[in-house]
Image: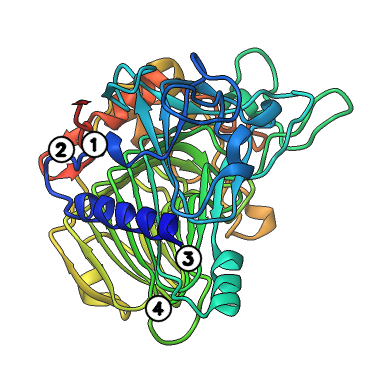
Amino acid sequence: MKMFLKKSLLISGFLLGLIILASAQAQVSLELCTKFVSIETGGGKEGSMEKPAKDLGNIISRLEPNDVVCIAEGIYTGRGDNGVDDIEIPVSVIGGFSTDFKTRDPWGTHKTIFTGIHNSDNFETQTRLSIDTTDWATKLKEARGEPTEHTIIVDGLIFDNGPRNYYKGDTEAMIVRQGTPSDTPTPESGALSISTGVNSKVIVQNNIAINFAPTEGVFSFFPGRAADVTIYNNVAANNTGAGFRLGTSFTGDEVPLYKFSNNISVFNEKHDAFGTYGGSGIMLESSSKAEISNSIFAYNDNYGVDNAKRSPDLVLNNNIIAANANADYIEFDMKMNYDEVEDESDLIWEASDNTNMTPSFAISEDWGAFYVSRNVIDRNAAEEEVQAVDAWYNDVRSFFGWNTLAEDLNVDSPVWLPRMSLDDVFKIALLYEDQYGVYQPAVETY
């Protein structure tokens, strides 16, 4: 019990340090780490700073509630290269450390990359990192009658699903969703999923996700009753589904509250060319409340903000919502432009100072040429009226100063979810337009 209380106090202190999110990035103290992982210097399962483990997956069975796992730079492919980490107790996972754990620079010299290996012997297709405390919280309350307050923090991880995907051809311009006897399928799952029991606090910050092909969320959240969720300074780019899915595992009073700020969600594609779902910057669900600010939702196949499931009392202030093919915002079946939501929305409590200013990322034209050559088919029309969305691809090309194309697209798209490089995603991640977008995480020394 003393060890449990000690760790709870450590987490509480960690939370106090992180919850105050200002223009300067909140810092992480090395003293709070209880487990260590380094692909370069690790070995065994001790998980100490002197003898770290080689992969998070190797010590999941040894983690205890409220552990803080600190992970050094390197490429992590899961236990046995399975490409999946599933955790069922409240823990925090912090990346971006040097191999000696004396400095931290998660978007610079010490990148911690979570990925996998396509066709590995132990290949799995689930979400890359999943943390689910629902059963833990229920059993704890039933067994001990103890309160179930708990905290989960995920900070400084780079999720790249490119090495796990099955691509058609050497250009890696088109994913293949179905597997073959010799090729495992492209996983239809996201980068990070967090589900919690009652009275949880969740902080997700300084993370990046690219090249994922889920049906719904890349970053997905299903918190329980009275949850307090902070999502800050993350990037979702070049994925199918929605960059962020703000859901819930609870209905009733005391719904979860999301504080969502300074995130970027761009180039999200529909599930496939003929699909009517996916392709949104952020997707909201009923029985949760969200305050969304200072974020960028742009260049998405369907919507910038998808509120078709009617999340109530939404706050939407100081965001860039631009160049989305279908609409900037949808509420049930009503589509609106960014400047119409304040007057026409029934569910938005407050909306001010949103803009359609189009951000210009210095990404490679090679990748951009693939992205805009896709045939984004409008299947909301009658079957016999299959057509590409009106020259949206030319609008996107013009935003980047590229030449426009003749409108001679055919129905079968030869390109879908072309693989994006880490170099290109960092050209997106390091953009900060006045008050919009993400900040470079601070470099820390210990």
Dividing the picture into quarters, in which one does residue 118 lie?
Answer: top right
Earlier sequence position, callout 3 versus callout 4: 3
| Alpha carbons under labels 4 and 2: distance apart | 33 Å
Q: How many marks?
A: 4
Per the rendering, the mark at residue 247 is 3
Q: Judge left or right: residue 184 versus residue 419.
A: right
SS state under label 3: loop
> Which residue lies under the disc numbered 2?
433
Circle 2 residues within 10 Å: few <14, some 14–19, many ≥20 = some
Q: Residue at x 49, y 69 (%)?
A: 248
Query: Which of pointers 4 and 1 indicates the residue nearer the eye?
Result: 4
The x and y percentages for residue 233 are 27, 43
Q: Are marks 2 and 3 in contact (CB under 8 Å)?
A: no
Question: Is 26 placed above or below 162 here?
Answer: below
Which amino acid type is shown beneath numbered disc 2? Glu
Which amino acid type is shown beneath numbered disc 3? Gly
Per the rendering, the mark at residue 402 is none
> Which residue lies under the disc numbered 1?
359
Residue 293 seen anywhere in this rendered image of the structure: yes
